[in-house]
Amino acid sequence: MMVVERVVNVGVRGKQLIQQQSNNSPADKVGIGTVLLLSSLIIPFNIAYAQMATTFIVQGSVMKPWGMIDAPMMNNADAISVLAFGYIIGNIIYPELNRRQIKIPTTHKFAIGSAFGAVAVGCAIITDYQIHRVYKERGEAISILWQSFPYFLIGIGEIFAVSAAYEVAFTVAPAKKKSLASAANLFMVGGAPNVFCIYLYNACRSWFLNANGLAHIHKLSDYSTAKVVNYFWLLEAIAMFGVIVNLLPPVKNWVASIEEAAAEAVKTPMNTPMIRKNLKQRRKDRGGTNSNNDEETPLIKAKKHADYLKYGSGPELRKFGSMRAGPSLKNAHHNPPPT
């Protein structure tokens, strides 16, 4: 028994129906506002992440360099952490979880990233207390290597939180809005947190003043009189807030529903019965063939074409003067003209 694949010529109207169905898919209901809300779930982590270029540098400026490694050089620890732990997480941990059919929800990835951010800020708090203790006891600065822990930990958090945010923003957005969704997510990763940090710093400006009321705390003697550690405690609370929000079941279910709708839109098959019904109606309106012949197999089409070439239906003038196949003139029987 030979199985022959059925071929449906959808035509222009069929393509319009397909386009209309794709436009009405659940994924098209995901707007840029939804993407912004999704990406806002990692703002607490990104606030902690933004401290690498600000508060961490201020803290590191009063610490003792280790060879060529000083406060600005410590930013490379974050890049090393992303490369090293990114390989471990992407090639060992995630494949192992996939083998065990364990899928980490997106919000839980956000929570894990925010947790690593909170631990990183916690290490910065311990470092700050250590700076004050050693200076008070011996009048010395501690090694810059103390900051390696916050940088490494915040790099691990970046792998979970930021990469998951880029993935979900691109996945749930409709095809025509993926570039715009990626741009919106980028703003929520790097733009909005920095603006928030500016307002946060201005509100807590008194913590960055020395005993003379000046914002010059780049020397250890001045830094020891400031209250920078209070700012770190505030950052710790913000990072922990991000962990709690992403662990809430309503938030998890909301994000999961958006992801499921986007996945369903991708795997939903084309609704061919509506296209077939439309084609039948069009052929009936223009006096076409019987509805039983609306769908012809390639085998039937080939046989009809062979009969057409062999027998034809008489000469027929086509565009550019081409002639359609017809009966041979040599075999044609002409009646003699009447006398």
Image (spheres, grey):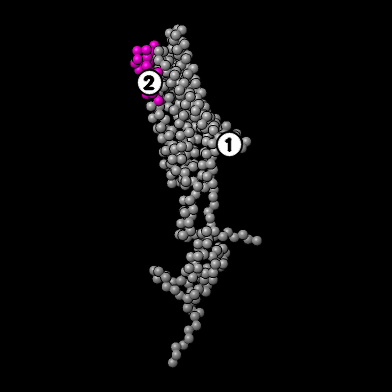
Asked whether 230 or 82 is in front, the reply is: 230
Q: Earlier in the sequence, mark 2 or mark 1?
A: 1
Q: Residue at x 48, y 55 (%)?
A: 18
Observer able to see residue 43? yes
- The image quadrant of residue 185 is top left
Q: Residue furthest bottom?
A: 339
Residues under labels 2 and 1: Cα distance?
43 Å
Q: Residue furthest right?
A: 1
Specify the amino acid type for callout 2.
Arg
x and y percentages locating residue 76 in the rendered image: 44, 24
Q: What is the tally of numbered marks visible in this picture?
A: 2
Q: Residues within 10 Å of mark 1 (few under 14, many from 20)?
A: few
Vertical order, 146 against 318 (above or below): above
Vertical order, 316 against 133 (above or below): below
110 drawn magenta: no
Q: Residue at x 38, y 23 (%)?
A: 203
- The answer to the question of whether label 2 and label 1 lie on touching residues, with beta carbons closer than 8 A, is no
Q: Which mark identifies residue 103?
A: 1
Observer able to see residue 302? no
Query: The N terminus appears in which quarter of the rendering?
Result: bottom right
Nearer the observer: mark 2 or 1; the answer is 2
x and y percentages locating residue 33 in the rendered image: 43, 40
Q: Mark 2 highlights which residue?
A: 205
Magenta region: 200-222
